[in-house]
Amino acid sequence: MPSAPNVRSLSRLLAASNAAFWVITSGGKIAFVSSEAAKWLGIEPDILLDRQSIAGSPKSEDPADVLAASLSPPPGLSGSGFSLLLVQPPEVLGKSIAPQHVRFMQFGTDAEALTIAVAGAFPNSVIDPQLSDSITIRQTLDGWRKRHASIAVIATAGTSAAAKRLRGRLQIAAKLRTHLGFFGPYGSGAESIASRIHLLSAPGEPLVIVDGPLMDAELLEATISPAINQIAESSKSTASILVRGLDEMPIEAQSRLAEVVIGAASRIRLMGLCSPQPKLYCEPIASDKTLAPDIASTRVLVPRLAELLTVLHISIEPLSRRVEDLPLVAAALLDARHAAREGTAERFTRAAIDAMVKYPWPGDFAELDAAIRHAVRTSTADTIAAEHLPLVVRSYRAGAGSKREAKPIELDVAVRQFELRLIQDAVAAADGNRAEAARRLGISRTRLLRRLDESQQ
Amino acid sequence: MMSFGQRSERHWIVCESGQRFSQMVWRLAADWIGSDESLVVVNSDAKEVVPLTRRLNGGIVLWELSSSREVEVVQSLTNFDPDGRSWLKIVASGSLTLHDQSALSELGVAAIIRHPEELSRLQRLVVSFGGYRG
């Protein structure tokens, strides 16, 4: 143990230092912030002490927690002991903070490890190339968190045109309390996005969640009664209804929902989660049921609901079409699980990223989230390698034919056709003698004749 | 046996040590072709790229540039037919300086990527490339 005078002299040096630096404990908490660092961040140093500093996962929405999270070291530091990162703190009290290059150094091991972060430009900025990809991803993610702090739902992370388009629509949606239609594949994270938008556009407003496919008109009324009661309380009360699988909701229930929402003027706001391209339902003419569309197998919206949802519709592209966003989305999911102490892994190996980007993710964002959860639990190191991913992901091979749609085969029809062809060949070989053909095929003459008769019908 | 040169085929020649990029081509480029077209992805050695391109009408060539294969790839690029405008050249490398990149541009390389997922950014370039229609 160092003697008290020894520590006191170090304390004096630290207090007098004109360098911008801070110290993070092995548990990810800020233990010290120099006065120069505090000046850069525009806050008192004490405000940040003991706050969690783990990538992208502030403990709360308190600006100090968000700021502390932005000061966290990049992934892979525990292995290399040294790393560089462009730290991009979020705005504090409406004031933007200039990003700075920061050198992170780790000393000691396990619970006694200590990380010192020193801000400033350094001439010797060479780092392990193995880590450079993870650091680039972290910097891009930090930039996304900084620019889209309010709507930073992980599913929206990315640099692709589709991700930018989505965030643009969400920024508008977050500022307006209006009916919203979310059109995306199953598992796209639409519900968490819709919930976030609801919190931002109508804070404090009650939200009723409805499972569309399970509803009939009567059950729907019972389910949305809290919203109806809410608006009955006073002429200024409002409520929102979020319907999962709106285009799978029975037509009668959809019509009833449209009546309620339109009847309440704008006091009930509807947020509908739908498949990417639902069809518009057309009323069958008179009682001719044969003209009615096969709604059991098609996702449809009644025109009145479709009209409401087109006020502001938000298309969520499937992850399979956002290949370049995958490393970012996966890293953001990993950050969240690492911060929740679900595992030790804090970055992906390149092989793991390669495996993820070539997999088509039929279950979309939800499947990716489940895969990351599996990998975090499987990995015991600070990295997630390809072998930690689920078998279906790591063994996927794209190739010729993988994109071809399987043609539906009716087995009974195919077998009958094959049998008939054999019979016809046997009859031809026996010069038209059906008894001989039946004998050669080892079947009765009656069966052979029956098959031939059936083929002529 | 694959047949080359048919108008309905979209050719990619991928010259790499593993299958990182050819797998990604299969994954992405299959969505970039019409329903009446087929995708042909050929994994080739750097030395065989030029003879192979002479047998085909056009398409995309992608070289993975690593320190161990640098010479072969650059030779293959320099031996490319100067009139080979029916071929779109892409190089994949994680460690190129700006100087390297401008040198590759002079050799007719249209795009440089670092990782397989960056191929998705080239969709418009690939689809609008005339030579892609063999």
Image (cartoon, coloured by chain):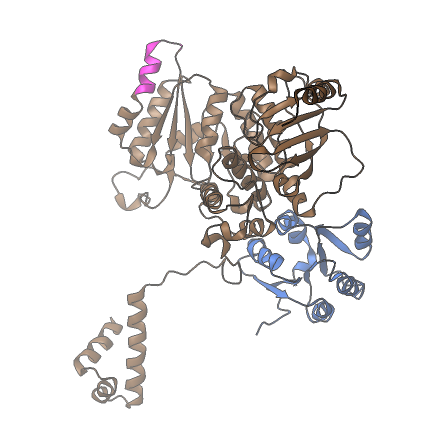
Toward the viewer: A457 or A213? A213
* A81 left or right of A425 in image: right
Res. A301 visible in picture? no
* A147 left or right of A232 in image: right
**Chain with blue colouring:** B
**What stretch of residues is rendered in magenta?**
A226-236
Determine the residue positioned at 73% across, 69% down: B47
Q: What x and y, as percent, mark residue B31?
A: 55, 53
Res. B117 visible in picture? yes
Q: What x and y, as percent, mark residue A9?
A: 72, 20
Q: What x and y, as percent, mark residue A381?
A: 54, 45
Most common SS among magenta residues: helix
In this rendering, is residue A228 above or below A428? above
Quadrant showing the C terminus of chain A: bottom left
Determine the residue positioned at 38% across, 37% down: A247
User: Is A28 inside the magenta-drawn segment?
Assistant: no
* A385 left or right of A291 in image: right
**Chain with brown colouring:** A
